[in-house]
Structures are given as structure tokens and as C-alpha cells.
Amino acid sequence: MNRSTTRLMVLLAAAGLVGCADADAPLAPAAAGPRPAAALAEVDGNYLVRFNGDVPAGFRERVAALGGSVIFVHGGAGIGAVAGLSPQAAAELGALPGVSAVAPNDATALDMAAPAELVAPAELASAANPASAQFFGMQWNLHAVGAPRAWAAGRLGSPAVRVAILDTGLDYRHPDLAGRVDLAASRSFVPSQDALLEASFPGAHPVADIHYHGTMVGATVSSNGILAAGVTSGVTLVGLKVCNLNGLCPVSGVLAAVTHAADLGVDVANLSLGSFVLRRDSSAAGRVDGPAFVAIVNSAFTYAHRKGTTVVAAATNRATNMDHDGSAFRTYCSAPNVICVSATGPTAAAGPYGPYVNVDAPAPYSNYGRSLISVAAPGGAAARVSAACSTFSLLFPGCRGGTGLLSASGTSLSAPHVAGAAALVAEDVGRDPSRIRTRLEQTADDLGHPGTDPFYGRGRLNVARAVGAN
């Protein structure tokens, strides 16, 4: 989500006090856009590669001979990425037999507004059902999509269904996520962050979230419902760390994670991150916005779809009509078979517990457009979305006590509502991305213009109807 004014408050539930804590405010997130300047250090000298079929024999050795190293290769998707090459070496790489294209790497940005509230409750109580979460009264978003009706029908989610969170990692020890994360399957695709994590939290799993974003996103999909509920409470999460502490997410890591998730057999992958590149006047080589870049990205997502993984992505937050920017490739909503999610949120709220006005209004920051939006879901506006705050966070030290929530707004939080619903539908139809998408679209509440609306797509998500509980 784009930059906004940061407002951080600590709510002391035991004493009923509210106090300002501006010193605990996070670093400003990077705005989504074409190739952020701050991303250059993460991607310069790195290139994406597309193969003619399988990975050529001796590819790693040839890259090493050119002065570089291999980030990853994936024969099934026919793509890879390399690091440390000069432009001349990259050109030589592109001329090798079996290599069809080489394109500069890029970095997308986390798409989240500055968090608003850090909630520190006095005590923890185990929740028998999500509706008994301590701060469920603040979660207008779950009521808006009918999640409580799905829970009442016994649709809490199955541990056998896995949702990959491609993000900054997950806090596997937060009360709302403890036991929900498959650590054996989780991994980091940003090795530059591993040393920082080890120095700050020795012995932590590489997927530990030193930012905060991924933990909020993951807990919106699946939560134990102790502090705040998620769309589900039984679904298993797989953390795939693809973004660094600055909120930058190299495309090479994202593509490696997408193909890895598909190979793991995860049911759903959530990408609450994105950017765009301009294809105008581009050529096949030497540009991050060229058709080679687009083809390489598309290959990864086509592979995931073929393997049965449903991909959900945030529409991002530039208030742009995506029907009128034909030269832009939306990384990752423009990729094939992706469920692209816009955001809704109240136009007014009397307080954190409501009452709320017009909860289904299009969020003013959300991108929109009939050509890309599949469905809409709550992302927040006058009232925000609340979820777990990582106890590993270096940006929010106040979260380290283990009882914190953050509240924020943006399509970063609308996407995981849909990912959670997709996980519930997967219980019914199996690992079938086309059927899952169709079910979500056909059961959404048709808002705005009848049929496909530029802001709502096929409608605002209805979790209860999606699982036949309405």
C-alpha cells in the first residue's frame, strides 16, 4: 500500500488507557511503481532467464565462467535467475544454446499503508471459535464477507489445506499463528536477510518475520482466533519469505517461490505485493519492461496453475484504472490465471468498534478495472483491518511481547481474505484453480454495475456463499 501518515497507538486493555508511541513508528514503505530506485541494490547485476525447454547442461558452470552465480533454475517452468553479471556477460549468456531470452531482474514493493494501531491486550484466552477472539468486535471485515456464517456451519478450514504466504515471512510463535505454520515447508528466498535475522534472533527459523507485513497477511488467512480471527482457523500456512526489511521483493525470489509453492503442492498462494512495468516501446533484450521479462513472469504463473496452485494477488494501491493503462504489465495481477483482488472499506466509523458506515464502499486507494479485477474484499478505509503483529519485528519493537495486533489498510489485506476463502473452497473441489476461481466469482455479492464492475469485478467476496453456508 502506498505511503500514508503513520499513527501508532498502544492500547493498554487492563488499564483502559490509550497513549501515543510515535517512537515506535515503522519505516515508511516503498511506494509501488516501476522499478523503485531503492531496489537497484537488490537487483542490479541480476537477470531473469528463459530457456528453450529444459535447463541446458552445464548452465551453472557457464554462468560461473561469465563471473556470475545462479540464483535458481526451474526446468518445469523453463526459467531461472542469475546474479553478478555485467551487461556484456548477460548478452553472452543470452547467446548460449538453450537460452531463449535474458531480461534484467526487477523488484516489486510491498503494497501496504503504514500500520495504525498496536493493540496490547492484558491477557490471552483460548478461543473455541473465531468469533470469541478478544478483538473480534473490531473485525468489521469478517462480518462483511459473511465469515461468521461459514464458521457456524462448521467451515473453519482444514489443516490438510495449505496456503503459501509469499511475503516478509511469518511469526510462527505469535499466539494467533502458533501451530498454524508448516515450518518444514517454509523457507527464505532472500538470503541477504538471513544474517540480519540470525544476529537479531539467534536460532530463529529463516522464515521469521522481522518486518511485520507477512504476519498480518498470514493471520488474515488463518488464525487461532485468540487475539483476532482470520477467515479460517484450521488452514495451514507455508511461509515463503521473498521481501526484505525495506519492503522490496526481487522478482527473481518471487518467481522461485511461486514455482517452489507449486512443487510443494500447496493449494493456494497469496501475493500481497506488486508493482508495474511499462511495455511501451520495449524490445526483447536489455530492458526490464520488455516482452522477455513479461514472458518469464508468465511462465512461472502458468506453471503454478498447471500444477494446481491457485494464485491470489493484491491489485495494489495507486487508485489507477487498469483498463486505461494498456502499456503497463501489472506484476503480478497481469500474469495468467491470477485472481486479482481490489479493496473495500467503510466510509466512516464512530470508533474502532463501530458503528461503521458503508463497509462495502470501494477503497479510495485501490486500483480497479474490469480487465483485471476478479473480486473485491475488505482492505479498510475509515476503519482498518486488524491482524497479528510479528514478535520478531525490527520495525515495531512493541510487538515483541507476543500479544500485539496491528491495524492497517490496503489491498495487501483484501487479497488474504480471498486466499482464505479459496482454501475453504479447495476442501470441496480439490486443487483445481479454475473451479476455485469460478466458485469465488459466482458466489460473490454483485455490487456496483451488474455483472463485471470496474471496482468490484464479479462482486465482493462472500465466504459463506462460497462454501454453501448462506
Image: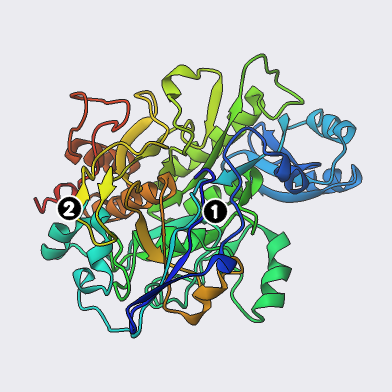
**Would you call the spot at circle 1 few (<14 residues within 10 Å), some (14-19), or many (20 or more)?**
some
Residue 373 placement, left or right of 152:
right
Residue 422 placement, left or right of 209:
left
Q: Residue furthest left?
A: 470
Is 29 rendered above or below residue 131?
above
The amino acid at mark 2 is Gly
Position in image of residue 35 (x %, y %): 67, 35
Is 78 rendered above or below residue 227?
above
Q: Which residue is mark 1?
A: 260
Q: Residue at x 87, y 48 (%)?
A: 64
Which is more toward the observer, 263 or 464? 464
The amino acid at mark 1 is His
Kindly state the secondary structure of the residue where label 2 is placed: loop
Q: How is the image coloured?
A: rainbow
Residue 200 placement, left or right of 408:
right
Position in image of residue 144 (x %, y %): 21, 50
Picture quadrant where residue 230 is located: bottom left
Q: Are marks 1 and 2 in contact (CB under 8 Å)?
A: no
Q: Which residue is mark 2?
A: 146
Position in image of residue 227 (x %, y %): 32, 73
